[in-house]
Image: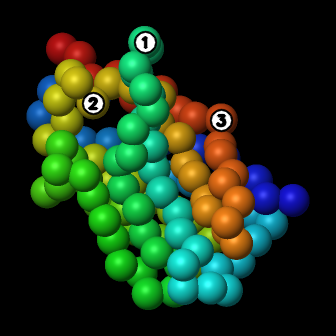
């Protein structure tokens, strides 16, 4: 079955950088509309999209609040999806989740905590 495991979270100061990784297993990208994404959720707030990478084309999409600071990438050899986060702000503090949308179904990891504080 599909499994997603996030890692790389931790404490970082404002302006710093952090790289998250999502180890994926149990599926392959076989359709153009398959995609993987990163989401985040802060306490008391709704889960929000951080970045998306499309299955076969590799096209990336970002919301305005992270555009230019975050980069999503895929390592096909290791079957991982990474999120490089630069110029971090306190408002980036949240639990970050890896998501895979495969043939119309959504799969989620358990999340990794990112805390941006001085």
Q: Using the image, determine if residue 42 lies above or below residue 59.
A: above
Which quarter shows the C terminus?
Answer: top left
Q: Is residue 10 visible?
A: no
Given residues 14 and 66, the one toward you in this image is: 66
The tag on residue 64 is none
Please report whichever mark, 2 or 1, sits nearer to the chain's N-terminal start.
1
Element at badge 2? helix
Percent coordinates x, y for residue 75 in the rendering: 51, 73
Circles 3 and 1, Cβ within 8 Å, touching? The answer is no
Q: Using the image, determine if residue 54 lies above or below residue 1.
A: below
Identify the residue at horizontal 53%, vertical 69% (top origin). Answer: 35
Q: Is residue 15 visible?
A: yes
Element at badge 3? loop
Residue ID for mark 2 = 92
Please report whichever mark, 2 or 3, sits nearer to the chain's N-terminal start.
2
Residue 16 lies in quadrant: top left
Q: Residue furthest front?
A: 104
Colour convention of the picture: rainbow
How far is mark 2 from mark 3, CA to CA? 18 Å
Circles 2 and 3, Cβ within 8 Å, touching? The answer is no
Q: How many marks?
A: 3
Element at badge 1? loop
Please report whichever mark, 3 or 1, sits nearer to the chain's N-terminal start.
1
Residue ID for mark 1 = 44
How far is mark 3 from mark 1, CA to CA? 18 Å
How far is mark 2 from mark 1, CA to CA? 14 Å
Residue ID for mark 3 = 110
Residue 73 lies in quadrant: bottom left
Identify the residue at horizontal 13%, vertical 57% (top origin). Answer: 68
Percent coordinates x, y for residue 64 in the rendering: 17, 50
């Amino acid at each position: 079955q599909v499994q997603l495991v996030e890692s790389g979270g931790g404490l970082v100061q404002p302006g710093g950088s952090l790289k998250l990784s999502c180890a994926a297993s149990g599926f392959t990208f076989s359709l153009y509309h398959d995609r993987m994404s990163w989401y985040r959720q802060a306490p008391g707030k709704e889960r929000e999209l951080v970045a998306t990478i499309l299955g076969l084309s590799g096209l990336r999409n970002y919301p305005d609040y992270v555009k230019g600071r975050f980069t999503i990438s895929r390592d096909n050899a290791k079957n991982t999806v990474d999120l490089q986060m630069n110029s971090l702000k306190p408002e980036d503090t949240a639990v970050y989740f890896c998501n895979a949308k495969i043939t119309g179904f959504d799969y989620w990891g358990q999340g990794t905590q990112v805390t941006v504080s001085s």
